Amino acid sequence: MAGKTPSPAISPTREEDFPAWYQEVVRAADLAEMAHVRGCMVIKPWGFGIWERLRDVLDGEIRARGHENVYFPLFIPLSYIEQEAAHVEGFAKEMAVVTHHRLESRDGKLVPAGELEEPIVVRPTSEAIIGASMAQWIQSYRDLPLLLNQWANVVRWEMRPRVFLRTTEFLWQEGHTAHATSTEAMAETMEMFGVYRSFAEDFLAIPVVPGEKPPSERFPGAERSFSIEAMMQDGKALQAGTSHFLGQNFARAAGIDFLDATGERIHAYTTSWGVSTRLIGALIMTHGDDDGLCVPPRAAPHQIVVVPILRGEETDAGVIEYARKLVGSVGARQRDSAGEPLRVKLDDRPHRAVDKRWQWVKRGVPVVVEVGPRDAAGNTVSYRERTSAGESRSASFDVFVNGIGPLLSEIQSTLYVRARDRLDAGIARDCTTRAEAEEFFASGGEGSESRAQGNSRGFLLAKWCGSPECEVAFRHLGATIRCIPRSPSDPDSPHPSFLAEGHSCVACGCPADTDALFAQSY
RNA sequence: CGGGCUGUAGCGCAGCUUGGUUAGCGCGCCUGCUUUGGGAGCAGGAGGUCCCGGGUUCAAAUCCCGGCAGCCCGACCA
């Protein structure tokens, strides 16, 4: 094997079969596995560690804006769901329903007994039940705004589960707020929309297109829905977060009213917004490579793993001591760009050093350090950056310790820039006719294999007249409008970075000035 | 919920057409030796209700019937 380029850890490669590659990364990186319950997953320590990082940081952002965490029940009375017509319509098909509260043994089998008078649904989202409480809690304009958030599991009975991307049960954060005016509620919607955008880009290093959902893609019951759309390495879009302006729809349905300063009784304006464990799927498909996952340093449970090279000799004790000293120096004294202590782990398990290192590479740890007798003797450190497949580097102990913070920042930035370049290169803006657009989507990815795997060629940014007919003009090719790019500071203005060429609708040729992002999606 | 396919060791598979010793192979796992700083080698070993239930047969992983589960492709979705 010496002297030869090692084969990638993940088989098949991204190029060969992207969906299979994805599943293999989930396995090889020890993130999660499908449970023995249909559509559900077991999130393993490494995968959950990433979720915890993400959760902790985002929770900080949410709290910093005045929201308070709460917890509402998993079960929702059916009658609550029935209150908002569009909401019912949107979620009815994927609802898990509890109809019994007891099991009885018959012929050695347990069968449901004790039928409930009113079936209970397992929450697919919590607008209905939180709205019911808001209606009780809010009496006066002085009770507003009410800013709530909860971290919870939800259940949506999906037809085609895919680990992290679409599972029957998933974890998320759902914010629910109530406001006195439409303007305020809209400002809240945009505020959290902005939080998601910068969270995705700065923390997860996933560049996104921020925009508004077209009518058909709106959250059931929302007046306006906004999403951040990320581009996966196969060119497909992934909705990575949503923020909804619900207007007075849910307030009307749930009776969330208040008396304003003039004594007039009016419906509150509500919002909701969320991101889910799907973000881990986005992370995999954005930063993963043919050697496995690649976790941005800010999201990594361990940013640095130190692997002592043990040889079963008398030098071992010294090597371990040296490794401990390194871990202590990095973990106790160094800070990342956000001022947090660095997360460093000593891997002293009794496996071969190369095997351990390889395992951490597949898991995507940003920096893996190997220290052996030579390093201990020379007061040096050997390390590899996950983002550069090249050779191991060497530095003196002090230089490494003092430079590791900046190095992690650099890796974070490298990942972002790579993804940003891919996104920029993957957006076509020059299709102005239906034929050109159809050619774009029909051509699929580069190469026949890629096409066979259903790889998309990317995003098409084109003008749209706004008609429902034109919205679905490319549905037969798997592409729909993912969003209408919007300026994060103004929901009614186009995003200056995402403008399409031309002045006529790509589907019908009518005059059009709306920029729509068409893409195949997850 | 329609169409196609598959259930054999932790994972990935062969065997099934044409029933017949102890059901194999790769990876992983365990032990030993040799190795070790670019993803080990050799030798030995553990691990299986062949998805479940019934039927045919002297004999079923293999044939038949009925279940169940999963995957892929569509319609739906964070």
Image (cartoon, coloured by chain):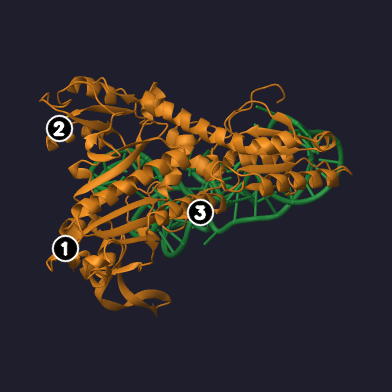
Instruction: Say which of A383 and A29 sits in front.
Output: A383
* Quarter of the image where one finds residue A91: bottom left
Evaluate whether label 2 is on the same chain as label 1: yes
Labels 3 and 1: the sequence-earlier one? 3
Give above or below for A100 relative to A65: below
Residue type at tag 2: Cys
Q: What residue sits right under mark 2 in the picture? A: A470
Report which colour depicts chain A: orange
Q: CA distance from mark 3 to mark 2?
A: 42 Å
Q: Check disc 2 and report its element: helix, strand or loop.
A: helix
Report which colour depicts chain B: green
Position in image of residue A25 (x %, y %): 52, 40
Q: What residue sits right under mark 1 in the picture? A: A267
Give above or below for A121 relative to A168: below
Q: What residue sits right under mark 3 in the picture? A: A52
Which quarter of the figure is the C terminus of chain A placed in?
top left
Left or right of A29 in this view: A59: left
Left or right of A461 in this view: A388: right
Labels 2 and 1: the sequence-earlier one? 1
Labels 3 and 2: the sequence-earlier one? 3
Q: Residue at x 57, y 31 (%)?
A: A387
